[in-house]
Image (cartoon, rainbow, N blue to C red):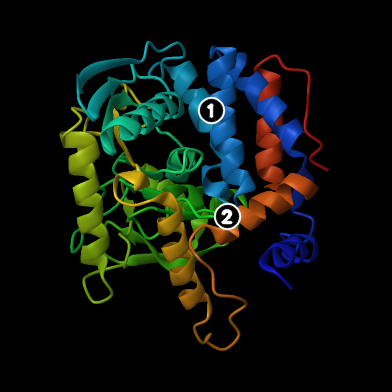
Amino acid sequence: MNNNSYYELYEKETPKSSGEYVRIKEEELRALVENIFENNGLSKEHSKIVTDVLVSADLMGISSHGVQRVNRYIMGLKKCCVNPRPEIKVVREIGATAVIDADAGLGHIAGLKAMDLAIEKAKTYGTSLVLVKNSQHFGIAGYYALKAIEKKLIGVAMTNSESLVSYVNTVGKTLGTNPIAIAIPKASLPPILFDAATSIIPVGKVEIYAKEEKELPHGWVLGDDGKVISKDSKKALEMIKNNRASLLPLGGIGEEFGGHKGSGLAFIIDIITGVLSGAAWGIHVGYTVGEKPANVGHAFAAVNIESFMELAEFEKRLEKYIEEIKSLRKIPNADSIWIPGEKAWYTMQTRKKIGIPLHKNVCNELNKIALDSGINERLNCL
């Protein structure tokens, strides 16, 4: 069985559990979410961009950053501090570099503009770096890195976020989840995509567990008393919101399993995306639904492979490396040896055919937002 067949089988034969999920067609979900954003002040073009990022996350199996985030963005648009009609502009530009002001708009919009600019600059200069300030949450970092793949370039995307993560050996929320994504083209699909937060999990994972009423695994969340919180996901989420708990950095609590590596990576990403761009950093980064604009910072880079060697030679060398990894001896009970991005790619291809699984709580939440937005269309959540 090839990997693609494995994922079709997995999606069909492993329902998300006991009727708690419904499967929604991609086109139906896109249409409703686009209408929601457009009815809440975004232009048609910007509504399509934000929706594409969110639905792409759900297609790839990254439900923490999918349409379950719609309510957060709508609340930000309604409350005060997300600009529905931003004037995004380049405010500094020298050679292969640039800084973009997002005008407090949703980060998806400025992020796509910045990644497109990074790609164009890499074609001219070989490599590029474009920073964004005065932005908001931008969804999955991998969405932007993958844009470079379409031009046979290597793509990089990073962002900081509101403080949710404890710095190693400390309590309290100091760092953002600060993800980094790197996409690398191959001679054949799927491309390589590494996309990960520098926290042990993104906060959206805790949100999903709370909405699904699932038990919180031990080792994700740290209370302000310095003890790890387990089991009650709703309580853990409430404690995070009330500044009584934080996510742990990648590696977990302390240094024994590498917590200093996760917090160190988050710190470095914050310097590049926040300090260097002119955006906020650490505890100064705001929340989408806050009292003032979040001033999130992003960074996008592209690498033109042909500045270093012929593309065909690179692809041949890369395929050889992948073959070596794929031929390694597996541990017992391992289903396959996966290259970064493969699972997400095959999940996407399968869900495009048979639909996207949404928890009923998320489905009903979207219908309520649609109702409140004056939209007649509804998803079938039964």
Could you tell me which quadrant the N terminus lies in? bottom right
Using the image, determine if residue 361 lies above or below residue 231.
above
The answer to whether 195 appears left or right of 25 in the picture is left
Viewer-nearest of discs 2 and 1: 2
**Could you tell me residue 364's position as x and y percent?**
71, 36
Q: Residue at x 32, y 22 (%)?
A: 293
Q: Amino acid at mark 2?
A: Pro
Is 375 or 131 nearer to us in this picture? 131
**Could you tell me residue 341's position as x and y percent?**
52, 57
Is any atom of residue 146 visible in this view? Answer: yes
Q: Amino acid at mark 1?
A: Val
Dot 2 surroundings within 10 Å: few (below 14), some, or many (20 or more)? some
**Residue 190 tag number:** 2
**Residue 50 tag number:** 1
Q: Are marks 2 and 1 in contact (CB under 8 Å)?
A: no
The secondary element bearing badge 1 is classed as helix
Q: Residue at x 16, y 35 (%)?
A: 275
**Residue 178 tag number:** none
Q: How many marks?
A: 2
Q: Earlier in the sequence, mark 2 or mark 1?
A: 1
Q: Quadrant of residue 51?
A: top right
Dot 1 surroundings within 10 Å: few (below 14), some, or many (20 or more)? many
The secondary element bearing badge 2 is classed as loop
**Could you tell me residue 191's position as x and y percent?**
52, 53
**Could you tell me residue 306's position as x and y percent?**
35, 45
Is 200 or 219 nearer to us in this picture? 200
Q: Residue at x 32, y 35 (%)?
A: 122
Is any atom of residue 174 visible in this view? Answer: no
Is 355 or 370 nearer to us in this picture? 355
